[in-house]
Amino acid sequence: MRELTGKTAVVTGAASGMGRAFADRFARSGMNVVMSDIERPRLDEAVAAVSTHGTQVIGVVADVADGDSVDALGAATIDVFGTAHVVCNNAGVAGGITDGGLDVDNWKWVVDVNLWGVIHGHRVFLPMMVEQGEGHIVNTASMAGHFAGHSGYTASKWAVVGITLGLYHEMKGEETGVGVSCLCPGWVNTEIANSDRNRPEWASPNALAEPDEQAEMRMQFLRDMLAGGMDPGEVADMVHEAVCEDDFWIFTDMSMVGLLADQHASIIENRNPTPRQRLR
């Protein structure tokens, strides 16, 4: 999709971080934008800022884990703009870090947002794109979707990588005119480490309310790495280019990609992976 002017982009998780940067970049390219997030005050402020670029921008509060809520997002998009041309399924949460065992409620919350949010985005927006013979889906995965980790976050991001690759083959094989990109960020300066602020009450077990010392150390490590990460605006430029050039992979840190060499070799050679040291 080389010509974006006058077309419509939908971005979830748009009130902050990468989502807000995506919305801003698309608006600067002349697109109308539907910005969606679960946090009303932040969303209203972000919409006001992105609207300064002169295109039409609306905000729709939605919980991507809830299919009905994403249905309403799609209906609002059609009501105002008639269709969508670019959809960034970007909303995501990190979940908690604990050594207290597998926390099922935490896993469910993370998978509901990170994976089902993408699935609902496909269900609602793909049919209109296929029908019009034009569009582009950008799914936010993560480098965690390539590196092993026993967490709901890793599980959700591996799944997003898988279904996005599958969707790419489906759209290309059927010659639908719909492009697909898989964004796999490394360290980016966002607030995802603080996503617990939106954790539902049913997913707030005591094990996460009082994490042990090792869990606290790993969470601080996460916050420090994010704080020193890439600016979201740089990622937005990469996403914009991928949409225009019909690129599938969007990697923000090729040094991380290089670390996958041994993992991929172990598959090709049918040998056990090399154990990696746990972060402390």
Image: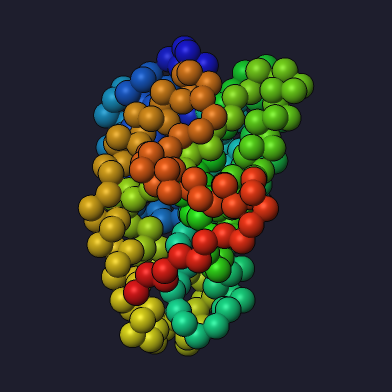
Eyeballing the image, is 84 above or below 119?
above
Along the line of sight, which residue is nearer the eye, 76 or 101?
A: 101
Q: Position of residue 124 (x, y in %)?
A: 67, 39
The answer to which quarter of the image holds residue 248 is: top right
Vertical placement of residue 127 versus 189, above or below: above
Q: Residue at x 55, y 73 (%)?
A: 106
Q: As rendered, which of 77 and 88 lies closer to the eye?
A: 88
Image coordinates of residue 217 in percent, x first then y, are 31, 76
Residue 25 visible? The answer is no
At horizontal 30% and vertical 35% (from top left) the residue drawn is: 234
Q: Residue at x 55, y 68 (%)?
A: 150
User: Which residue is at the front of the view, 230 or 243?
Assistant: 230
Quadrant holding the C terminus: bottom left
Identify the coloring: rainbow
Residue at point 50%, 85% (across, down): 100
Q: Percent position (x, y) of residue 211?
A: 39, 84
Determine whether, in the image, residue 184 is placed left or right of residue 29: right
Where residue 42 appears, x then y in whole percent?
33, 52
